[in-house]
Amino acid sequence: MRSLTLTSALMLAMTGTAWAVDTAEEKIKQQLNQVDSRLKVESIEPAPLAGLYAVTLNSGETLYSDGQGQYLLAGQLYKVEEQGLVNLTEEKRAEQRVAAMQALSEDDQVVYKPEGEVKATIHVFTDVDCPYCRKLHDEVPALNEMGVQVNYLAFPRGGQGSRAFTTMNSIWCGTAEERRERMDEAKSGGRVDVDDCETPVMEQFALGQKLGVTGTPALVLEDGRLLPGYVPAERLKQTLKLN
């Protein structure tokens, strides 16, 4: 079955059938279900603009609707303030990323801790076969020296069944120390012996997609900002405002 995208779903005609429903949330859900039953709503809440509702889908995408579910907007909502444009949609997504990262257990990640004080923690969605992921991994020691803890989350771009998935599943099968050793080996281009067990690899892959990750590496900062692509350690130091 062909996967549904938000854009294609919104191109479908919405019917004018009326339902006897009590709330705007119910009306919006009814209308979206009529567009396509595969559009699953995670939350609906009033948007900062009067009369508008922010609708978050379980895919992580956000759209905006009137209270009747008759008009839909897909895109970013901005507010003009003295300092310039503020992306309210991204602010909300950043909050969601913060909550998602806080809900994770370090036991389910590959963690590289500084020897001294932890001044900042970054979560990195990674693929062992990604060249720029390997380049970033080479800078993990430098990041640790700066006081940055690096927590790896799995994001095998080819999905389940790919070579990266097999390798990363084997990495995640190890103990905390074995995971680091296997990650180091894989990121240096070496071979990791196949190990099969139940891991959170695909759960983390799905989480990354939900949070807006489209490629690797993808860094999630403590304030929920998502930095796509390779970021040199020195630039990260500036971004994190580390002394």
Image (cartoon, rainbow, N blue to C red):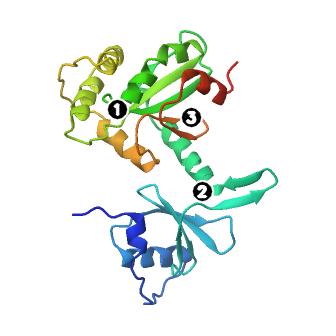
Q: Quadrant of the C terminus?
A: top right
Outermost residue, bottom side: 17
Tag shown at residue 89: 2
Dot 3 or dot 2: first in sequence order is 2
State yes or no: discs 2 and 1 in contact (Cβ < 8 Å). Answer: no
Mark 1 → mark 3, Cα distance in angstroms:
18 Å
Q: Is residue 55 above or below residue 169?
A: below
Dot 2 or dot 1: first in sequence order is 2
Give the residue at mark 1.
127
Tag shown at residue 100: none
Label 3 secondary element: loop
Outermost residue, right side: 82
User: Residue visible at 23% across and 41% down?
Assistant: 160
User: 211 or 216, which lies in front?
Assistant: 216
Alpha-carbon neighbours of circle 1 within 10 Å: few (<14), some, or many (≥20)?
A: many
Q: How many marks?
A: 3
Dot 1 or dot 3: first in sequence order is 1
Provide residue 93's location: percent of width, then percent of height: 55, 50
Label 1 secondary element: loop
Give the residue at mark 3.
221
Amino acid tagged 2:
Thr
